[in-house]
Amino acid sequence: MWMGLVLSALSPLASPPQLPALLRVPILMYHRIGDPEPGAAGLRLDLVCPRSIFQAHLRFLRESGYTSVTFRELQAALQGTAKLPRKPIVLTFDDGLESHWFAFRDLEEAGMKGVFFVVSGKLDEPGRLRREQVRAMANGGMDIGSHSATHADLRALGPAEREREIAGSKHELEALLGRPVLAFAYPGGSYDLECLPILAAAGYVFARTTAPGIAAVSLAAFELETVPVWHDTDSHRLEGKLARLGKRDAAP
């Protein structure tokens, strides 16, 4: 008996589970979902994804084995409280546009999830989502992230203004939703290193850029790359982008 107790005491303890340091996850970036305005050119055309193409993307992703996840699920996986599906992908939508309500409905119908980055100070304006819509989207399983308070170029702002755009927008959205806002998307993709400590102090966990690539997701990852979707990114081109960027970022 005593020998058994001694041997038991000398036995090594079970190793704690190994948590992933980072996850390689593609993050798609959409803007307006629908038809371009008459005569649209440049970015006003490039940032539009026709709804028929968006719906085709959802079919392609499902058929290719992808499962859409939110930043909340990525945080849980990195903290070891949940597991991700075999091929996770994040679908993000910038600017809080009214067309995102239709994207939300398409996601619901397809049994998929999205992350909607809204400009907190522009909610309820013409062409933008309404506050009650944002609450309904969050209650419907979507993530809501901040895209700043006014969509200002953060690099041109002083410390107090940056705080308002980054932290202030987070507080506004959390008051609206009654839940933490984990992710931020830089307006126009513009930021500098001075933004990062503000994001951390405000309690963000992730921030997405507009730089192309397959994101290396970790906790406090504030420079996540994205897979941009343009007006001519049909399912075939999307497949090519995912393959090309995946090979590039997998290279040593």
Image (cartoon, grey):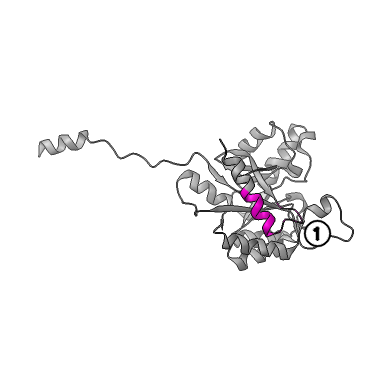
Locate residue 43, reporting x and y percent: 82, 50
Q: Is residue 114 visible?
A: yes
As drawn, 136 above or below 77: below
Locate residue 41, reporting x and y percent: 86, 53
Locate residue 154, reporting x and y percent: 76, 37
**Residue name at image x 56 percent, y 57 percent:** 66
**Residue name at image x 58 percent, y 62 percent:** 62
Locate residue 219, reporting x and y percent: 55, 40
Q: Nearer the viewer, residue 115 or 166?
A: 115
Examine the structure image and report whether residue 232 is included in the region drawn in magenta.
yes
- The secondary structure that most of the magenta stretch takes on is helix
**In the visual, does 205 lie left or right of 150?**
left
**Residue name at image x 60 percent, y 46 percent:** 246
**In the visual, does 149 lie left or right of 42?**
left
Examine the structure image and report whether residue 60 is included in the region drawn in magenta.
no
Q: Which residue is mark 1?
A: 127
What are the residue bounds of the magenta stretch? 229-243
Location of residue 131 by image quarter: bottom right
Instruction: Point out the residue furthest to the right here.
Output: 39
Q: Nearer the viewer, residue 198 or 223?
A: 223
Residue type at mark 1: give it.
Answer: Gly
Q: Nearer the viewer, residue 40 or 3?
A: 40
Q: Is residue 204 visible?
A: no
Q: Secondary structure at mark 1?
A: loop
**Residue name at image x 74 percent, y 50 percent:** 119
